[in-house]
Amino acid sequence: MKRPYLTLYGIAFFVFIYAPILLVVVFSFNANPVNMMIWSGFTLDWYRELFGIKTALSDSSTYIDSTDQLYASIRTSLIVAFSTSVISTVFGTALALAVARYRFRLAGFYRMLMMVPMVMPDIVLGIALLIFFIIIGINLSVVTIILGQCTFLISYVFVTVSARLAQYDPAIEEASADLGATPAQTFRKVTLPAIAPGVMGGGLLAFIISMDDLVITYFIAGTGNTTLPIHIWGMLRRGIKPEINAIATMMLLFTVIVAGIGLYIRSRKT
């Protein structure tokens, strides 16, 4: 295939992927409170509303979501994301180290089992977790959200750290032991710094996925434990409003910042 056609296909691909995201960002500044597809002028009022600032457009909008409920959902999402990322990073890293270091008969089968939560349909996993929590008698709460998300986020951390361990030379640990280091010292000063980019990448990936998860969290959240994606979904059921575009843009910016921090830390570690 000729190079001009490849370039054209490449441009078309990126337009198809990023054009909808760009539209969301652009229309988050649209002054039209009723029909977001009709441009009525530039405004920052929808962002002001997110910070609880009353604007002129607030009175003309057919629906302005409660700022208190929005902040509560953000707080819940952050609590869940921090908790699940820490738990998933610890267990995912430990599992990756165990599988990489020890040879046992069902190692390949075990690796396959770790991949299953990543490819399983979200609605199936959500229903399964809901039934499981009901059977064992756990009330749906923030705790069940954290436990439920950890069941699949550990797999993401496991894969990320395993990829890093594939490039890791275990002879370094043997050299550390020969020099008199204890296993704890070897892990803290040799192993962990060597795999730190994979651990950090897995933790940040788990954090972003947790903040974005809707389907699984919707099944296991229970009453009064609304995360930000569930809150946005509730707003969408009343119609697409400009403030939703503003929230989506803020989430996009937050994701880019977290990803940038991860890339920076990785470049400093390597």
Image (cartoon, grey):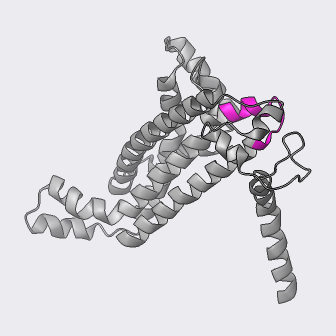
Q: How many labels does the image show?
A: 0
Q: Residue, x 78% and y 40% (percent of image)?
A: 57
- 200 vs 116, left or right, is left
Residue lying farthest to the front in this orientation: 56
Whether 177 is drawn above or below 52: the answer is below
Taking depth in this image into account, of 12 and 138 the one nearest to the observer is 12
Image coords of residue 176 (percent x, y): 16, 67
Looking at the image, residue 128 sits to the left or right of residue 11; the answer is left
Q: What stretch is highlighted in magenta?
A: 231-242
Q: Where is residue 130 in the image (x, y as percent from the top left)?
A: 60, 21
Q: Quadrant of the C terminus?
A: bottom left
Residue 199 in the image: state x and y as whole percent. 40, 56
- Find out whether residue 234 is within the magenta segment: yes
Choose between 8 and 79: the one closer to the eye.
Answer: 79
Q: Can residue 137 be seen in this view?
A: yes
Looking at the image, which residue is at 78% across and 57% down?
26
Q: Which residue is drawn at 78% across and 61% down?
A: 17
Residue at image location 49% in from the left, 35% down from the top: 80
Q: Nearer the viewer, residue 120 or 108?
A: 120
Q: Based on the picture, tell me whether residue 177 belongs to the magenta stretch.
A: no
Q: Is residue 2 visible?
A: no
Horizontal placement of 193 versus 231: left or right?
left
Foreground residue, 48 or 237? 48
Q: Pinpoint residue 157: horizontal percent, then vertical percent.
A: 47, 50
Which quarter of the picture shows residue 90? top left
Q: In this view, does 216 lie to the left or right of 3?
A: left
Q: Toward which corner of the image does residue 133 lie, by quadrant?
A: top right
User: Where does the N terminus fall, quadrant-wise?
Assistant: bottom right
